[in-house]
Image (spheres, rainbow, N blue to C red):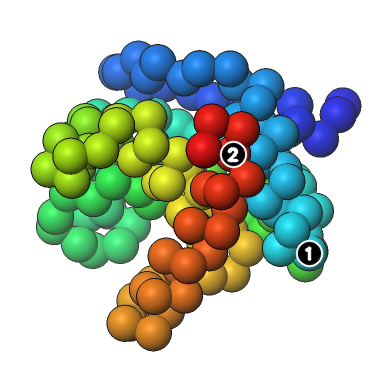
Amino acid sequence: MRTIERIQFHYQEIKVPLKDKKTIREWIVGAITREGKKTGDIDYIFCTDEILLKLNQEYLQHDDYTDVITFDYTDENRVSGDIFISYERIVENATELNIATEDELKRVMIHGVLHLCGYKDKNPVDKKRMTEKENEHLAFHPGA
């Protein structure tokens, strides 16, 4: 199995208009490689706000909506995990930020990968670093 095929896209109760999945996979593998890591199995699960809220409540004991939750299964240097993304939240955030939904989706997708690479975002210093890394990797996307 080739590395890019280890990145899969799934949908729960929602359809997401992903353009050119092969290019997205290659971009994600490139980001992981630039972080000095290897690509393992990564599953993106696109879902509704309600599904992500239930995961947030059950696994993180948070009672609020979010755009992404990452379950990290990384083993040593091989990045693996499940990245749940609320497409409804992506659309709403993009509207509020006055940016293209596709751009917000790419940011959140790479955000999840960066969590798998070990980056955190719970304090201001970590959030700033995470945003810098997002911007760095977004610049490598062919549609940037």
Q: Dot 2, how many residues are within 10 Å of its Cα: few (below 14), some (14-19), or many (20+)?
A: some
- Percent across and percent down for residue 13 are 29, 18
Rounded to the nearest angstrom, the CA distance separating label 1 from label 2 is: 18 Å
At horizontal 71% and vertical 34% (from top left) the residue drawn is 26
Place of residue 35 in the rendered image (x, y in percent of width and height, measured from the top left): 71, 63
Q: Nearer the viewer, mark 1 or mark 2?
A: 2
Residue 54 visible, this angle: no
Residue 95 shows which numbered tag? none
Residue lying at the far right of the rendered structure: 1
Disc 1: which residue = 36
Quadrant of image for the N terminus = top right
The amino acid on which the numbered mark 1 sits, given as a three-letter code, is: Gly
Q: Earlier in the sequence, mark 1 or mark 2?
A: 1
Name the amino acid, label 2.
Answer: His
Is 52 on the left-hand or right-hand side of 16? left
SS category of the residue bearing label 1: loop
Q: Residues within 10 Å of mark 1 (few under 14, many from 20)?
A: few
Question: Secondary structure under badge 2?
Answer: loop
Name the residue beneath numbered marker 2.
Answer: 141
The reply to whether dot 1 and dot 2 touch (C-beta < 8 Å) is no
Picture coordinates of residue 39 (x, y %)? Answer: 76, 47
For the residue pair 125 and 112, the one nearer the viewer reads as: 125
Residue 59, visible in the rendered structure: yes
Q: Identify the residue shown where x is 33% and y is 82%.
A: 123
Residue at left 30%, top 18%?
Answer: 14
